[in-house]
């Protein structure tokens, strides 16, 4: 195994992106199609408690919501930038240097999923890789039925109202503002009469808060990567993630990770026992 491939394996397992190594495929620059063009980027901060055995530890990560004419795209900011910059580095023949630099910065991000809203029309499409497979599932937009609540509250500088929804085994409360007439929000949440500026679950394990809204001078493509997806359901996807947590040693070994990376993966997986969707 050459140095570049070995570096990829150690790097990705150390950061738990869990990308399977394929020696014949391009690492970043995979085929993709442009499905829309974003004119607005909204940044949220996610605060979360990933270890149910140690709820005093709160982790934070910035997340991006791209707003196109018909489509919304949601992903972790660091991982989104990692992919975009990695594509450029691969095209320019400096991928080895790029990965070494990212290892030092340790900025790839925790969340590697992509969420496409209203793509295809009327659907939410969720994609991620659970070793060794790229998985995709769809949900109906109409399945997100909010219960609107009375009262107003100032949140992130906006006048907001509240709405509630039960989703993924959690009860969520959203704060939305009609001052920003965009019926979008973080993660899969959308469909309220204004932008969701905050949404939190009742247990206090996950909370998204608005950081900024940026209107772009030049539109940014919203791209859908054309991996060889296996289409599944949300329930089966959650089961696949649970199986990965239980079987991380053999999955890591199959992907070519060494003993050190395998042990790091086990320790981190033991702490990642409180996913955002629990059923």
Image (cartoon, grey):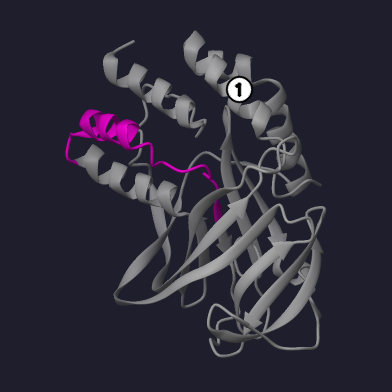
Residue found at x 77% / y 88%: 151
Q: Residue 75: percent from the left, percent from the top?
A: 50, 55
Give the image quarter of residue 36.
Answer: bottom left
Q: Position of residue 158 (x, y in %)?
A: 56, 85
Relative placement, left or right, of 74 versus 271 is left
Image point (55%, 47%), residue name: 113
- Above or below, 216 relative to 84: below
Q: Residue furthest front?
A: 56
Residue 208 in the image: state x and y as whole percent: 60, 62
Residue range highlighted in magenta: 92-115
In terms of depth relative to the viewer, which is nearer, 228 or 78?
78
Q: Secondary structure at mark 1?
A: helix
Say which of 85 and 58 sits in front: 58
258 to 194, vertically: above or below:
above
Q: Is residue 108 magenta?
A: yes
Q: Which residue is mark 1?
A: 267
Is residue 98 rendered to the left or right of residue 5?
left
Assign the N terminus to one quadrant of the image: top left
Q: Residues within 10 Å of mark 1 (few under 14, many from 20)?
A: few
């Amino acid at each position: 195994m050459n140095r570049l491939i070995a570096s990829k394996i150690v790097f990705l397992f150390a950061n738990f992106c869990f990308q399977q190594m394929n020696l014949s495929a391009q690492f970043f620059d995979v085929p993709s199609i442009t499905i829309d063009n974003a004119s607005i980027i909204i940044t949220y901060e996610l605060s979360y408690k990933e270890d149910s055995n140690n709820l005093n530890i709160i982790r934070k990560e910035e997340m991006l919501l791209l707003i196109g004419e018909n489509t919304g795209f949601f992903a972790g900011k660091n991982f989104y930038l990692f992919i975009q910059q990695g594509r450029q580095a691969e095209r320019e023949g400096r991928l080895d240097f790029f990965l070494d630099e990212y290892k030092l910065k340790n900025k790839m991000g925790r969340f590697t999923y992509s969420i496409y809203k209203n793509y295809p029309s009327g659907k939410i499409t969720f994609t991620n890789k659970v070793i060794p497979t790229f998985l995709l599932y769809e949900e109906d937009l109409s399945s997100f039925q909010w219960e609107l609540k009375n009262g107003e509250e100032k949140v992130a500088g906006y006048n907001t109202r509240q709405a509630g929804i039960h989703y993924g085994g959690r009860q969520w409360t959203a704060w939305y503002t009609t001052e920003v007439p965009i019926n979008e929000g973080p993660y899969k949440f959308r469909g309220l009469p204004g932008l969701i500026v905050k949404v939190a679950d009742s247990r206090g394990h996950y909370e998204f808060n608005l950081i900024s809204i940026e209107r772009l001078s030049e539109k940014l493509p919203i791209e859908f990567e054309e991996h060889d997806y296996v289409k599944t359901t949300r329930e089966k996807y959650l089961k696949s993630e649970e199986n990965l947590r239980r079987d991380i040693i053999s999955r890591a070994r199959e992907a070519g990770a060494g003993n050190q990376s395998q042990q790091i993966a086990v320790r981190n997986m033991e702490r990642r026992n409180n996913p955002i969707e629990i059923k």
